[in-house]
Image (cartoon, rainbow, N blue to C red):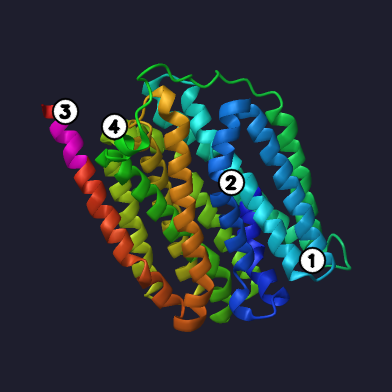
Amino acid sequence: MLSAVVLAMTLGAILGDSLAPDRRLATLPIVAMVIGTALTSLPAAMLMRRLGRRNGFLLGTLFGAGGSLLCALGLQQQSFALFVAGHLLIGSYQGFANYYRFAAVEAVDASRASRAISWVVAGGIVAAFLGPQLAVSGRDWLATTPFLGAYLAQAGLSLLALAVLSRLALPPAAAPGPGDARPLRELLAQPALRIAILGAATGYAVMIMVMAATPLAMLGCGLGRGDVAPVIQWHVVGMFAPSFFTGALIKRFGAPRIMQAGFLLLLAQIATVSSGNGFAHFLSALVLLGVGWNFAFIGGTALLTQTYRPAEQMKVQAVNEFAVFGLVAVATLSAGGVYQQFGWTALNFAVAPLLALALFAASIAERRLRLAAIL
């Protein structure tokens, strides 16, 4: 799934810029992908509640294969509308697949939850190399239409995921008993739950907004298209490579402190962007962006799993995913316009207040947990 997302992030804005009737719509394919994720999150949770995790995950892979094929058709026919629609379906694929990390939590005991989340997210390290490689090597597979082969290959990978997931065995979701499941209003009254959602949403929204505009900014600063793929590749490495130890860090220091570290790294990325527009500046800034996202997102997810009972998991997870990707959709939708109107540096500074708010909230969560441990 993440290879499809990384491929879309690598090519979506660049190809959208050539297909769109207005250059301000260049990032619309990426926006459509994020909107697809947000719109699918709630129905995906309801469907998996009724039919089980595996059946939901299998349906998601079909969305992924269909979306990649639709993108390929849009390129072949030079149709911006079809290209955008294909990314909407790829987003729906992500809407189902985002529950992989929660399914992993349900398959292990509570003491191993943060590590399970980390290992599932760490699978994205494959996407760091596979997504950009598909973008580069698939450019000329079919001479008539550049990059058509990349999306066809991604459709094949989605079908391969379908075959793998058909073997998946997970424990059934806990059925709520009398008094087991609290009302949603009561759940949302928990400060830790609200901070977990805010932290994950902020980290993801900032990451996606900056990442979506990066290819356009690099080209606008005079760098070549060949420079885009390695920057995106190492950004994705930064996103997922820390997952091999993020779970252990959360277990040792607590989720709120790791979230704080993530927000500080995201602020450091802004400082790096403001120091120059060379290849090294983009590369180092995007690596910081990736690692900051990892700590904020996994930390937020780990904190979230501490706020609900087994019978409440589907409800809370669905609200979390909808809130996270709703904010991500807004951030992505604004990325192209903010970049075109105000420039690359201004786009990065625009997210600083949100990061400061999330950092403050995470510090409050850490203080509350520390006091609770003392008492």
Residue 364: percent from left, percent from top:
20, 46
Give the CA distance from mark 4 to mark 1.
Answer: 48 Å
Q: Name the residue under label 4.
A: 252
Query: Disc 3 or 4, which lies upstream in sequence?
Result: 4
Which quadrant is home to the N terminus? top right
Element on which disc 1 rests: helix
The residue located at (34%, 28%) in the rendering is 182
Residue 193: percent from left, percent from top:
32, 40
What span is colored magenta in the figure? Answer: 366-372
Query: Disc 3 or 2, which lies upstream in sequence?
Result: 2
Give the CA distance from mark 1 to mark 3.
Answer: 57 Å
Query: Disc 1 or 3, which lies upstream in sequence?
Result: 1
Number of numbered discs on residues: 4
Q: Mark 1 points at which residue?
A: 75
Give the CA distance from mark 3 to mark 2.
Answer: 38 Å
Of tags 3 and 2, which is closer to the observer? 2
Residue 268 or residue 72, whichever sits in front: 72
Q: Name the residue under label 3.
A: 373
The amino acid pointed to by label 3 is Ala
Q: Residues within 10 Å of mark 1 (few under 14, many from 20)?
A: many
Of tags 4 and 2, which is closer to the observer? 2
Residue 62 or residue 144, whichever sits in front: 62
The amino acid pointed to by label 1 is Leu
